[in-house]
Amino acid sequence: MTLVTLADVLQPALTGGYAVPGLVCLGWEDMRAYVRAAEAERAPVILQAGPGCRAHTPLPILGKMFRHLAETASVPVVAHLDHGHTLEDCRAALDAGFTSLMFDGSRLPLSQNIDATAAVAELAHAAGVSCEGEIGFVGYAGGENSAGTDPADAARFARETGVDAMAISIGNLHLQQGPGSGLDLARLRAIEALTTVPLVIHGGSGVPAAQRAALAATTRIAKFNIGTELRMAFGTALRAAVARDATRFDRIAILQETETPVFDAARTIFRNLGASGKAVQLTATGRANSDPQ
């Protein structure tokens, strides 16, 4: 069993000068490719089930899929709920075997966000799993605008919620299809000056690769969520597979052709964040062989 919690993989990343990717899952083909890529790179991996994934596949099924992959993997695997919007969402994920709960109260007033996130953190910690929260609001490319994280609010949020990881808004956006203009480093430094918790960047696909690598190595950003660039790799491969033979109708044969491109794209992400080879260190501690449940 290599199922671990978010804290198990982020604390070593924080002290080791690298970051662990939170890879957004939509189905069996991509999550299997992510674990294969993590094994090839000897890296820890965070499998994430966001709202879109959960709308397509029931949460209890996702929990079984993630846990099956962890049970058969040789590297640490985190089963992570991404953007849980209610305490009930998080409790359901816990019941489904997830080892990390991300509560998203970023649209709430600060005090309500703190209270709600603290309740999820208490639930998670009582069960021996981790909790991620979000302070500020990370917007969407072509959609809702961001609200940058206030450093003083971040300090209060981290202190009063007890989260194991804190997602921040410093110019990052969800759903960017190409590198954006980079992150607000002055805001990041101000947040780091007032907090000690591992930091998380949502919308990591929009952060230029060179900046991702530098931030993973030199800041307390210990987790980058990556989804859009991997979905683009999957979609490109799927279109090519369908176009290659107009008479082919077997979905398994078609979908199999997406796995290698997604596997290759994920390997590049592990290397970029400096996570390659770090699974060996985690396994040596014994934490990667424990079951939080």
Image (tube, rainbow, N blue to C red):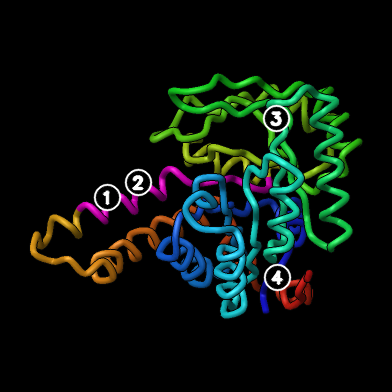
Residue position for label 4 = 281
User: What is the spatial separation of the Cα atoms under label 4 and label 2, in whole angstroms?
Assistant: 32 Å
Q: Amino acid at mark 1?
A: Thr
Check if mark 3's residue and mark 1's residue have beta carbons within 8 Å: no
Left or right of 254, for residue 82: right
Q: Residue at x 53, y 22 (%)?
A: 144
**Residue 9 in sight:** yes
Which residues are the magenta region? 222-239
Q: Earlier in the sequence, mark 3 or mark 4?
A: 3
Secondary structure at badge 1 equals helix
| Quadrant including the C terminus | bottom right
- Disc 4 crowd rating (10 Å Cα; few below 14, some 14-19, many 20+) is some
Task: Between label 3 and label 1, give the one nearer the viewer.
Answer: 3
Residue 145 percent coordinates (x, y) = 55, 19
- Disc 1 crowd rating (10 Å Cα; few below 14, some 14-19, many 20+) is some
Residue position for label 1 = 236
Secondary structure at badge 4 equals helix
Q: Amino acid at mark 2?
A: Met
User: What is the spatial separation of the Cα atoms under label 2 and label 1, in whole angstroms?
Assistant: 6 Å
Q: Residue at x 46, y 35 (%)?
A: 175
Residue position for label 3 = 106
- Disc 3 crowd rating (10 Å Cα; few below 14, some 14-19, many 20+) is many
Residue position for label 2 = 232
